[in-house]
Amino acid sequence: MNLPTIRQRLQHKIWPLMFASLMALTTGCASAREEAVKLPDPAVDTPVKGMQTAVFAGGCFWGVQAVFQHTKGVMTAISGYSGGAANRAHYEDVSSGDTGHAEAVKVTYDPTKISYGQLLKIFMSVVHNPTELNRQGPDSGTQYRSAVFYTSEDQRTVTQAYFEQLKTAKSFSRPIVTQLVPLKAFYEAEAYHQDYATLHPDQPYIAYNDLPKVENLKMIFPAVYRDSIKP
């Protein structure tokens, strides 16, 4: 583990978190996190093929990875970086916002057990808030933007159709700002970022921001939730 790097990251995250906690106490909020949104199933979905991959960006990758790791049918969920012009990606560079990359998670899944449309629904419902522009919770910057990096025309079609479906149904009170762009490259994040929420459940940032997302998955999607992060 790169201790200076992880310490810098936590310092960046903890101060906004402490401020948010104080605001929650002074305003009487029951929870500083936004509640998950119950959404309709996608009207259009991808056909069943062999093992597939999907790449999602929705704020800090710790929580995104954790949710998908607890989803049945997901074989692996790997934290990484995608979406930038730079042909490299390291945490120090990405966190500056200069590379154009977003923190993202590559999900490898078995479409006979869970469809792309179901993963997309989970992403839009419990993983993050798709109406927040270039931020999620206490984290702000383009590296925390909401994005779907599609790996096939089927994924592009399903995602675009679902965005329109949610817009028509007025599922959110604000416009969806999630980018829909083709996947050009995915760079795996450093080892100390992998499985971070599982390995550090008592860390304040994880307990406050990420574990509730996993609990929402369990509550809203009980049929696809699994306790283990391994298939």
Image (spheres, helix red, strand yellow):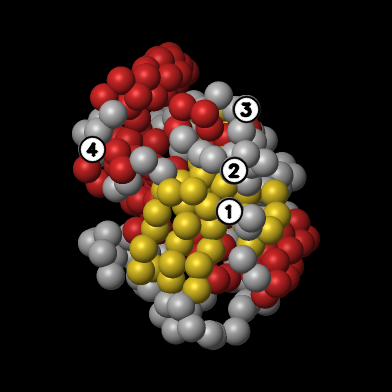
Q: Earlier in the sequence, mark 4 or mark 3?
A: 3
Question: How many C-alpha atoms fall within 10 Å of the one at disc 3: few (<14), some, or many (≥20)?
Answer: few
Mark 2 or 1 closer to N-term?
A: 2
Q: Earlier in the sequence, mark 3 or mark 1?
A: 3
Name the residue: 23% across, 62% down: 228
Q: On the image, numbered disc 3 is attached to which residue?
A: 98
Query: Which x, y percent locates residue 80?
Result: 46, 46
Label 1 crowd bin: few (<14), some (14–19), many (20+), radius 10 Å = some
Tag 2–tag 4 contact (CB < 8 Å)? no
Number of the front mark, 2 or 3: 2
The image shows residue 144, relative to residue 48, as above or below, that is: above
Q: Amino acid at mark 3?
A: Asp
Instruction: Say which label, 2 or 3, has the lower sequence index.
Output: 2
- The residue positioned 44% from the left and 84% from the top of the image is 112
What is the C-alpha distance between the residues marked 3 and 1?
Answer: 17 Å
**In what quadrant of the picture does the C terminus appear?**
bottom left
Q: What residue type is disc 2 on?
A: Asn
According to the picture, the residue beneath numbered tag 4 turns out to be 200
Asked if residue 181 shows in the view, the reply is yes
Residue holding disc 2? 87
Q: CA distance from mark 2 to mark 1?
A: 8 Å
Pick the residue in front: 229 or 96.
Answer: 96
Mark with earlier residue (4, 1): 1
Residue wearing tag 1: 185
Q: CA distance from mark 2 to mark 4?
A: 30 Å
